[in-house]
Image (cartoon, rainbow, N blue to C red):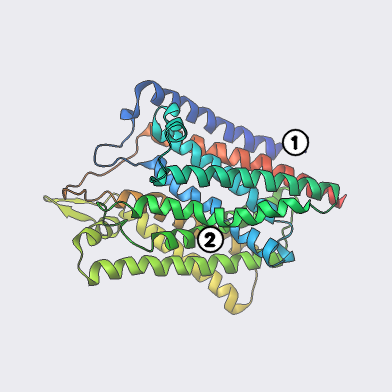
Amino acid sequence: MIEKVLKGKSTYWMWLAVLGTFIAIGAACYVRQYMFGLGLTGMSRDVSWGLYISQFTFLVGVAAGGLMLVLPYYVHDYKAFGRITILGEFLAISALIMCLMFIMADLGQPLRGLNVIFFPTPHSMLFWDMCVLWGYLILNCLCGWVILTAERKQVHPPKWIYIFVYISIPFAVSIHTVTAMLYCGLPGRHFWLSAIIAPRFLASAFAAGPSLIVLACLVMRKFANFDAGKEAIQKLTTIIMYAAIINTFFFLLEFFVGYYSEMPGHTHSLEYLFFGLEHDGHVYNNLVPFMWTATAFSFTGLGILAYMKIAKVFDYRLVGTAAALIFFSLWADKGLGFVFGGFVPNPLNEVTEYIPTANELGITLGIWATGFFILTLLYKIAVGVEHEIEA
């Protein structure tokens, strides 16, 4: 099946060339960071997690979002997801690879990552995060490839593979739950010290992952002659809408807890994100435009989906617009605001804003491009198999 990635239209090769360019830029930036150290980044003593870890946090959710395809299809036998379940599994693979790459970039020296294996500490959430990330990655590689091979041969997948499919379901939940525990287990950061961080992460994951799958399906419908089916897309939009509403509800609870109880440690982070935080005569508000844009995107996307449900209309352009708006709103919320807002103010009530450097942005774009490069190749194989069966 791998030979299918070597055949494609000019747009396919142009897309890979563009991604390859960004990968090369990211690689050059990483070599520079490797030679000179993390001093090239915008991180500091007060902001020890920057763009790399924020992107890792968001992408763990994207990987977990594939559960919204696996669960209905394999557990509830929802046939409409038959053509796109493999897309969710392949999305998880590329997202998890990006997660691991962002962790390696944040460590500075890649060999430090081996310390988690050579010196395991089961009482640490980092150890369990490594276990569930690698476990979920291996499970998706195994299940996706075996099931796609069986589909190509037009035979039933071997029964033993379903054991691993069912095991992957709790792994999908655990990768984001354990990641949430990395944050809510830090008592010195009031913004993260909340029992609903894990449910909030899962709600956002079940909206972000399916949103990206919908966008991928629409792109492949236009350029790859792959139609996921109207029923499948409609069901995905329903999942996205409910998950995004639940995520919004959880976020509003943070405002209630902070402002109603008048907890300074909680309200200061929210003020910094949405209104600007005044400290020592200076207003810190770098993230305010991003958060209000994310808010506008989220409510606009939800409004579009609600209109389609109420009016009982279906338009691929509206679906794509709503999915894109919700995806980018969740990226701004969890990929920027959640992590950076938690560092403001620090435990000593001082404010240190974080601004990523050009080198960090280059590495980040390179890793995202690597993920989309891998995802494109995997989807090319999956679509090629579908076309081969149809022929």
> Which quarter shows the N terminus?
top right
Mark 1 sits on what residue? 2
The kind of secondary structure element at disc 2 is helix
- Residue 35 occupies quadrant: top left
* Residue 59 visible in the displayed image: yes
Say which amino acid is labelled 1. Answer: Ile
Q: Residue at x 46, y 50 (%)?
A: 58
Whether residue 226 is situated above or below residue 374 in the rendered picture = below
Mark 2 sits on what residue? 206
In the visual, does 44 lie left or right of 121? Answer: left
Q: State the residue lying farthest toward the top.
A: 35
Say which amino acid is labelled 2. Answer: Phe
The kind of secondary structure element at disc 1 is helix
Q: Residue 241, percent across and down?
A: 53, 68
Residue closer to the observer: 237 or 190: 190
Q: Residue 207, percent across and down?
A: 52, 61
**Residue contact at pointers 1 and 2, CB within 8 angstroms:** no
In the visual, does 152 lie left or right of 261? Answer: right
The image's mark for residue 294 is none
